[in-house]
Each structure stands twice: as structure tokens, then as C-alpha cells.
Image (cartoon, rainbow, N blue to C red):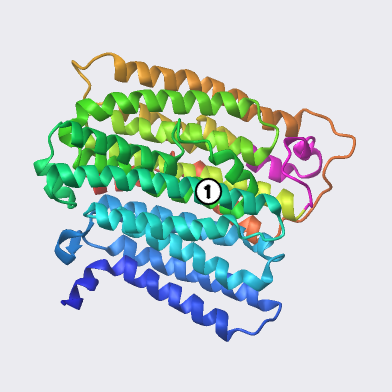
Amino acid sequence: MNYSQFLNMIPEATLVLALVIVFCADFALHKSERKNATLGVLTGALLLCQLVPCFLAEPAEAFGGIYVTSPIVNVMKVILTAGTFIVVVMSQAWLETNKRYTGEYYMLLLSTLLGMYMMLSAGSFLMFFLGLEMASVPMACLVAFDKKKKDSAEAAAKYVLIATFSSGVMLFGISFIYAATGSLYFDNVAAAITASPLAIIGMVFFFSGLGFKISLVPFHFWTADTYQGAPTPVTGYLSVVSKGAATLTLAIILVKVFGSMVNYWQPLLWVVIMLTITIGNLMAIRQTELKRFMAFSSISQAGYIMLAVIGANPAASQTALTFYVLVYVVANMSVFSVISAVEHRAGAGTQMSAYNGLYQTNPKLAFIMTIALFSLAGIPPFAGMFSKFFVFMAGVDGQDGAPFWPYFVVFVALVNTVVSLYYYLLIVKAMYIKQEEHPLPTFAHGRAINASLTICTIGIVLFGVCSCIYQWIANAAGM
């Protein structure tokens, strides 16, 4: 065996090294008050160091093409690593109540990130499935991490059951694809696949299995319960980092492997996108619990992310999708940082009524929450407006002479943007307009929450106006 091939997997190799270092540090450190902070700083520092190999990694393949990387994949790894770093920072307040399991928490986070790396760099369905499971199994442990809450155990049970079912559906689809083409390698499948009934069924099953992971309608039923029951930092991680990896992987596979069958999967995607955005928005309006509210918001956002894939220009689609995920990471993590601060620092629950009159006692926190919500809604001049604009443009790019359906899908998405603005403003209304006789008291957020809020707010403000960020992604995608 030629072990030098591992040199082509520098991001994964260095992440494994980081995982080993955290594992050893957890054993070596004394059970003192400083252990939680020390492990948090160590994990954060290792994630920052991890950005370097992700930035510097060259296009390469290993082990006969089962592992393949490209510039756009490396860009996504940078974004996922940065998102994980924000999760580590914002988790400090919550981990103060779970000091016994701090090391395990960080190791599970790094393990899921490693699985996402492998999933993004897969060159075959076998590597893709292994990476997906490497990300999903530790994620189920993270969802159930708060042993003191029955909701956490229930959320984990639902997540495990749905994840197992979706994995089975996906494997069933992969078996059909293998029967139709005689290979699991993406390049070989793309060269041999035809629109036979066997291949079409395999593609639909594969899409359905991954649709569960992304929370696309009608595969979304687990999302609200799991988001509500999971610890707040884990909910944030599940909503942005995990979703970002799955969406880019699906986009790459649809174009790279099933490109010759675009006339079959594109209409399916049109219907799913319209249903996902519309149902996610309508259900979000009805929510009074903030984490369930953000769950349906994330379902709707998944539809917007996938909107980029229906375009006829793969480079523009990958660029718009990746930029949307980048902006979504900072905006959504800002919201969850505020939720975490209110929940653990102020001792309040996650009901929307707890935010009534928040501006009276915590104006800075309310202002940051408003900026994040405006970005999610796509209000200028924040980065969310630019990310939505780019996915709308990517959705109709290269559609000259095509049926009116791509334009109709984008029109539905535009109309739903107005709906989303309404329900995001419900939280703003609660913070600024609704009067509460006994609003939350003024409380200190803690340095960790302040750091995560600062990082996210800077991203929300700057990513939309710093064209070099978009250009960096566009160059990686080959535009």
C-alpha cells in the first residue's frame, strides 16, 4: 500500500491529528474548573490552525480516485471549519453546566467535521456514504448530549430513526445505480449511466435519502422536534454546518454524476424547492417556540440554497450556493448565539414571549439579533440580500430558450421572501414594540458569547460589501 497518498489528504490528516490532541488533552488535564476553558481554547486554536491546510490544499486525488478534492471543495471546508469554530466559541456558556463531558463534546464536533470533509471529497458513492455516516452518528450523540433533558433524548431518538431510514433509502438507491452502471466511482457512473428505469429509480432514492439530511420537503418532519430538543449550540451546528456540507455535495453529485439525466432530476428539484420554501415559511409563522421557529426557517433556507442548483451554469451555481452557505453560517449562528445567551445567562426559556421588551434591558443584544434576522430575510445592505440575489441569478442563468418553469420557481422564491420578512419581523416586534411588565433583566453575556456575536456580526456586515470574498469563491468554482 502506498501510504504517501495520505499526503494528498492534508486537511483530513490534520483534522485527525487535532482530534487525537483533544482526546489526549482530555485525559491529561485535571478535573478542575479550568478544564472546560482549556479544552475550549485548545479546540478553537486547532480549528483556526486547520484553516491553513484547507486554504493551501491543492486539487488532488488518492486511492484510485475514491478521494478527490478541488478548489471549491477546499473553500467549503474552510467555511465549515470556520462555522465549527464559532460553535466551539458559543458553546462555552452551555458547557459550564456539562463540565464532566467537555472533552467528549469537542471530540464529537471534530468527528462530525471529519465526516463532512470526507463526504465533500468523495470520488465514489462508497466514500460518500462512509463520510455521511461519519458525520451523522456523532451528530446523533451531540443531539442527545444533554442527559438531564427528556426533550434531548427524544430529539436524538427521532434523529437516529430518521437518519437510519434515510440511509437505508439512499443505500437502496445506490444499489440500483450500481446495478445500472456496474461501478460506484462518480466518473465511471457518469460515463455509463443512461435514463433507464433502474437508473431513474436509483437517482430518486438517492435524492430522497439526502433530502432527509438537508430537511427538504417532504423529508423535513424530524427537523422541528430535533432542533427544539437538542442543546442550542448543537442546534446551530446542525442547522448550518451539517446542512452546508450536504447541500454542496448534492449539487456536485447531481451535476457530475447525473448530468446526463438533468431532464429527470431538474423538474423534481423545481417541485421540491417550491414546496420547501413555501411550507417552511408558512409553518414558521405559526411557531411560538424560538428553536422550532428557526427549524422551519432553516427548512425554508434549504430551499433557497438548492435554488442555485437549477441553473444551467454549474460554476455559477456552485459559487452562489457556497456564498449563500457562508452568509447563512454567520447570520444563523448569530441568532443561536443570542438564544444561547438568553437561555443560559439569563435563565430564560426559548419561548418567543421571553424576548418581549428585550431592547429595554439588553439593547445591544436586541440590535445584533435584529441585524441577523434582517440578513436571513434578505434586507439590504446586509450580506443576506446579496446571497439571495446571487442564488436567484444562478437559478435563471443559462436558461435562455428553456421552459418558463425555472423563472416561475425563482418568482415563487421572491414572493416567499416577503413572507419570510413578516415572520422574522415578529421577533423584532417582540424585542422592540411589545411591552413586558417584567422583561428579562440586564445580564452579562460572557466573553465567549461576545466573541461569537462579534465574529458573526462582522461577517453579516462585510461579506456582502467585500467583493473579494465572492471573487475568491468564484475563482475556486472556475468562473
Q: Is residue 435 visible?
A: yes
The picture places residue 405, in percent across and down from the top left corner, at: 30, 16
Specify whether 105 is left or right of 203.
right
Residue shown at 18%/49% (left/top)? Answer: 186
Where does the N terminus fall, quadrant-wise? bottom left
Tell me: residue 403, above or below residue 210: above
The answer to which quarter of the image holds residue 350 is top right
Helix, strand or loop for the magenta stretch, by majority: helix
Residue 347 image point, x, y percent: 79, 52
Instruction: Check disc 1 and report its element: helix, strand or loop.
Output: helix
Q: Is residue 327 left or right of residue 420?
A: left
For label 1, the residue is 159
Q: Position of residue 51 (x, y in %)?
A: 39, 63
Q: Does the stretch in magenta take in 310?
A: no
Callout 1: 10 Å neighbours few (<14), some, many (20+)?
many
Identify which residue is drawn at 39% across, 57% down: 133
- Above or below, 263 against 452 in this view is above
Question: What's the magenta region?
Answer: 346-371
